[in-house]
Image (cartoon, helix red, strand yellow):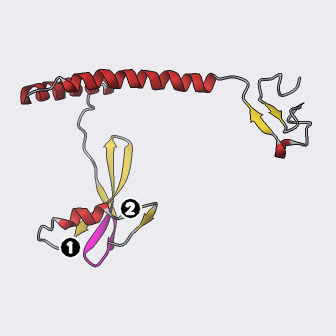
Amino acid sequence: MSLTQQGFPRIISSKSSIHDPVTSGMQDTARLVPLNRLPRMVHEYFVEHVRKAEQVAEKRRLQIRSEQDAAAYVKEIRTKIQQCLGPWPDKTPLNSRITGILKRDVYNIEKVIFDSRPGFPVTANLYVPKSKKKDASWSHRLLRTFNAGQINPL
């Protein structure tokens, strides 16, 4: 049984003759021809359903005329999200611990581990300013630390 009989795509060369990918030496000049549209059909199916859901949501949002309407809409959306996610987990101790501190000029980086749930540790870095006064620009500087996969100095 050839690969094309097993459901693999055929490779058609520029000479319009059909070749088996295993036996043909013309793979470098050939183009791949799909045998079915299933991946595209599934994609189009989900895109259509998302578009319909967005149209329904947009109609609902256009009905908001007052602050009470907005509050009711927010409550409705929160209820739907809660139904999707299920009940909130029970509150448990974080068991946080600092595993190290990196000292910088104007801030320290505290390496922290905490338990998001019992038995599920999470690592994090806390950027703690050394200055005691509240500086509004500090949070903006933190947001600039990650850019295109590279860490930039603060």
Provide residue 108's location: percent of width, then percent of height: 28, 70
Q: Residue at x 11, y 26 (%)?
A: 65
| Horizontal arrangement in the rendering, residue 153 relative to residue 149 (left or right) | left
- Which residue is label 2 attached to? 146
- Which residue is label 1 attached to? 130
Span of residues in magenta? 100-111
Provide residue 48's location: percent of width, then percent of height: 45, 22
| Horizontal arrangement in the rendering, residue 146 relative to residue 57 (left or right) | right
With respect to residue 97, does 6 lie above or below? above
Prevailing secondary structure of the magenta residues: strand
Provide residue 80's location: percent of width, then percent of height: 26, 23
- Residue farthest bottom in this picture: 105
Between residues 17 and 81, which one lies in front from this camera angle?
17
Provide residue 3's location: percent of width, then percent of height: 83, 28
Which numbered disc, 1 or 2, marks the residue closer to the eye?
A: 2
- State the image quarter where residue 21 is shown: top right
- Answer few, some or many: residues within 10 Å of disc 2's Cα (few below 14, many 20 plus, some between 14 and 19): few
